[in-house]
């Protein structure tokens, strides 16, 4: 019986790291179902959902010992499919843009959590504005909203929070 495993790896960025990790997965007959990877500062972060035969799980952990000895943090976490948990929930794209400052992510995330809204994925970045060089904040993500929530109630409150933070918040149905 195959297992779904969330693999995380963090550590110094180096050329060939993705090849090294995926080679271990393939060697054990596994498959990368989905992944996210990014270089953040000088560090590399990898998040993968892999599927591997039950009897290969312990071998995978052993195989990643060499990565750990190189200073990488590697975790393997068995997980279950939770699509039924969010059946009927409504997906929305959320985008936030404005001058960067502390607390934007936290205040947006707090509002979403207080409404029972789940963050499915989120990417954030900051870059200098073309003319002034002022740091600009950008956030894009997908949220899952319980079907019993009134769209205008939670989205209008989110827009108010955006006004308080001096950022624009746009919410659209996932197409």
Image: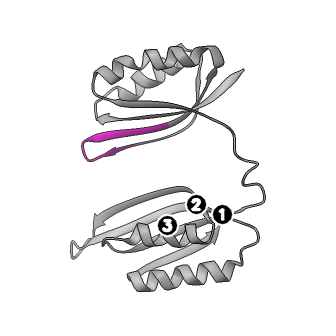
The image quadrant of residue 2 is top right
| Residue that label 2 marks | 142
The correct choice, above or below, for 98 with respect to 144 in the image is below
Q: Position of residue 22 (x, y in %)?
A: 47, 24
Q: Is residue 48 above or below residue 82?
A: above
CA distance for labels 1 and 2: 8 Å
* Distance between the alpha carbons at the discs numbered 3 and 1: 19 Å
Disc number for residue 109 = 3
Q: Which residue is mark 1?
A: 174
Q: Which residue is nearer to you in this view: 62 or 24?
A: 62
Q: Residue at image x 73%, y 51%?
A: 85
- Which region is colored magenta? 38-47
- Left or right of 87: which side holds 143? left
The answer to the question of whether label 3 and label 1 lie on touching residues, with beta carbons closer than 8 A, is no
Q: Main secondary structure of the magenta part?
A: strand
Q: Tell me the SS state at disc 1.
A: loop
């Amino acid at each position: 019986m195959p297992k779904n495993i969330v693999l995380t790896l963090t550590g110094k960025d180096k050329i060939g790291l993705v090849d090294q990790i995926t080679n271990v997965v393939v060697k054990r007959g596994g498959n990368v179902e989905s992944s996210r990877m990014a270089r953040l500062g000088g560090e590399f972060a990898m998040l993968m959902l892999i599927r591997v035969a039950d009897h290969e799980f312990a071998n995978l952990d052993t195989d990643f010992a060499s990565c750990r000895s190189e200073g990488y943090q590697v975790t393997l976490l068995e997980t279950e499919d939770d699509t039924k948990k969010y059946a009927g929930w409504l997906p929305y794209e959320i985008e936030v843009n404005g001058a960067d400052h502390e607390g934007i992510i936290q205040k947006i995330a707090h509002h979403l959590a207080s409404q029972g809204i789940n963050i499915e994925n989120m990417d954030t970045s900051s870059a200098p504005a073309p003319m002034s060089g002022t740091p600009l904040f950008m956030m894009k993500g997908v949220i899952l909203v319980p079907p019993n929530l009134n769209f205008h109630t939670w989205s209008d409150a989110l827009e108010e929070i955006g006004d308080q933070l001096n950022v624009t918040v746009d919410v659209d149905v996932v197409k």
